[in-house]
Structures are given as structure tokens and as C-alpha cells.
Amino acid sequence: MIRPVFLLLCSAFLALTVVGDEVDLLKIAVAHKGPGNGKWTLGDTLHPFRNGYQWRTPPGAQTSKVDLEPIKVKGGTSYILDCKMLPTQALKIHVYATFYDHDGNAGPRLHVMSFQNSSIYWKIERELIVPPGVEQLELCLVLSDMKLTENTNLGFISEMKLRSDGPLKPHPELAGLYGKNLLPLGDFSGFAEGESNLEKLHIMRFSQKPFTAEVTGSEADRALKIHYRPGDYQYVTWFTPELPLYGSAGVFKCRLRGKGRVQLMIWWNRPDFPTVFKHFGYFDLTPEYRDYEIAVGCDDPLTRKAAVAVSCRDQEAVFEIASLSFIVPEIKPSNKE
């Protein structure tokens, strides 16, 4: 099996603080080159050429992570990422975003998009919804599916900009649901110890080999215990009702403890069309309960309902879920200009 080599280009730029601002990410990147020693900025890969930049790996950058400071953004706002580029043939590009709160705490890395072409000049416009409570954004490009060595030609880039599209405008039908848990349950206090019927537990029905799930603990301290082994169905999933979620933001919270590694996910479920999965890294579980929180914007117009999932990804794990929720926070107008 061929393992792709990855080049991570983590891009961060100057402050973007006013609705309507447009930031030229390439111009800023070129002005902020890195110190070398295995760390590279996006600017270190860019070389002026005609009306843009030739894109090449720096010396010694067969596998490199390239960092800059995050961009300042407004929470509860829609942004547009504009790119004009001609990637070299066979190069696959994955775009990721990391959100930071007002204390500088980083959330899990969010997959924004992936694309691949055959040396075609593209203009790409991608909506990026920033949830409430976010103050900074870090973008990351991951390149794969081709061997990357020193001075590898990655292609040509003539534009990479981020612009605000204004505050989020959730559908009016959501107004009465702000702050409420949209999942069919928030904990397992209403179940008897030993309950294992997945349908009664409101877990998504599936036909593959099931994991073992049962309610455990005293009446005052119920939890759902999952025994997962490779080959079992990978996703422990709960759905919201059908709702017009596009243009809103959602927050998934859960309380977990156990042994093993899991991945937290949010799904945008579409009718008669492949569902979009938002993946959020891997989490090493601890013997003590820990609270996890993920905020994400619904940027898919076909979404009819959301789902939250704890995924085991073919790695053995035993864990307990004490509580979970998915809420749509109210988007309050900002008084700051």
C-alpha cells in the first residue's frame, strides 16, 4: 500500500475585524516568512511569477508543518474563502480550519473541503461559517497523493482571500429552539440499569455488526457504556428532528470517560444524497470524566437534520457517555464596528 506524503501549510494572517473587510492572504503570507529549521510559512513556498506565485516546497521540506499566527474573526459570521489556483497534476488538497475562543483555546481541527484536478486553473469560492464564541481562525492546507521532495512544483496560485459575508442568518423556524437540546435525550437517567435496546436508547439503526451498549451505574449516576471491537459498526449516533439548519451554527457537547481513542463527529444529513461528515481529530480517553465541546457552522443547504456521533474507527475502546447535547445558539447582533 502506498502511503501519501503530506505537506501541512498552516496559514494565519492579520486581523480581520470589520464586516465587509477583505484580507489578501497571499500578500500577508509573503511578508511573513518563517525562520527555517523545519518550520515554514506559506510565504516560504511562494515565488513571484507573472500575476501570481509559483508554488514550490522549500529546501528540506519533504514533510513539513508551516505555521503562522491565526486570523482574528467575528463569531457568528459567515466568511468566504476565495482562491484562484492551478495545482500540479495528481496533487490533492485538503483544507482545514481550527477555531480559537477569546482565551486562545483551540478547538478540534475542522475539515473544510478537499479537491483534486488535472492541472486545471480553478476559481474556488468556499463558504466558511464561524460559530459564536470564536475570535480567531487558523487555516491549514494538507497536500497528498504525490511524492513531495525538496523544490517540488506544487502549482500556481494567483489569489487567496478571506472576506466577510456578514452575520449568520438562521432560519426563522429555529428561533424557538435556541439553547435547547435538539437530541432525543440528554442523559440516561430515565433508563433502567442494563438497558441495551439501541432503538429505545435512540441510537441510529444500522444493519452491520453491532457494538455492545448498555446503561450502567446507580439510579443517580446512569451512563451508557460502549464496548467496541474492530469489525463492529463504528459510529454511536443520535439524530435531531428535521430542521432548516443551513446558515446556523451548532454546538455538540458530551461527557466521556474510558479507555481507547475515539473521534467526535457531526453529520449534516441530506435527503437522497450522501451525508456530509465533519470529523474532529482523535481523543485519547481518560479514566475520569472529561467534558468535550465542538462548535461548527452548518454550511450545507441540503441539510435536513443533524447527527452527533462518537466514532471508534476500528480501534478497540471501552467508554461511558454520561451526557450529550446538540444546541443551536442564538446569534446576537454585535454592537462593535
Image (spheres, rainbow, N blue to C red):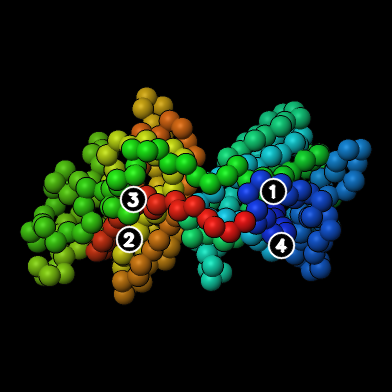
Residue 58: x and y, percent?
82, 55
Name the one closer to the observer, 107 or 75: 75
Residue 72 vs 169, above or below: the answer is: below
Residue, far front: 335
Nearer the camera: disc 3 or disc 4: 3
Nearer the camera: disc 2 or disc 1: 1
> Amino acid under label 1?
Asp
**Tag 4's secondary structure?**
loop
Mark 1 or mark 3: which comes first in sequence?
Answer: 1
Identify the image quadrant of the C terminus. bottom right
For label 2, the residue is: 254
Mark 3 or mark 4: which comes first in sequence?
Answer: 4
For label 4, the residue is: 68
For label 3, the residue is: 178
Mark 2 or mark 3: which comes first in sequence?
Answer: 3
**Tag 1's secondary structure?**
loop
For label 1, the residue is: 21
Mark 1 or mark 4: which comes first in sequence?
Answer: 1
Name the residue: 21% across, 59% down.
187
User: Residue 292 vs residue 105: left or right?
Assistant: left
User: What is the CA distance from the residue labelled 3 to the residue labelled 4?
Assistant: 35 Å
Q: Residue 54 lies in what quarter of the image?
A: top right
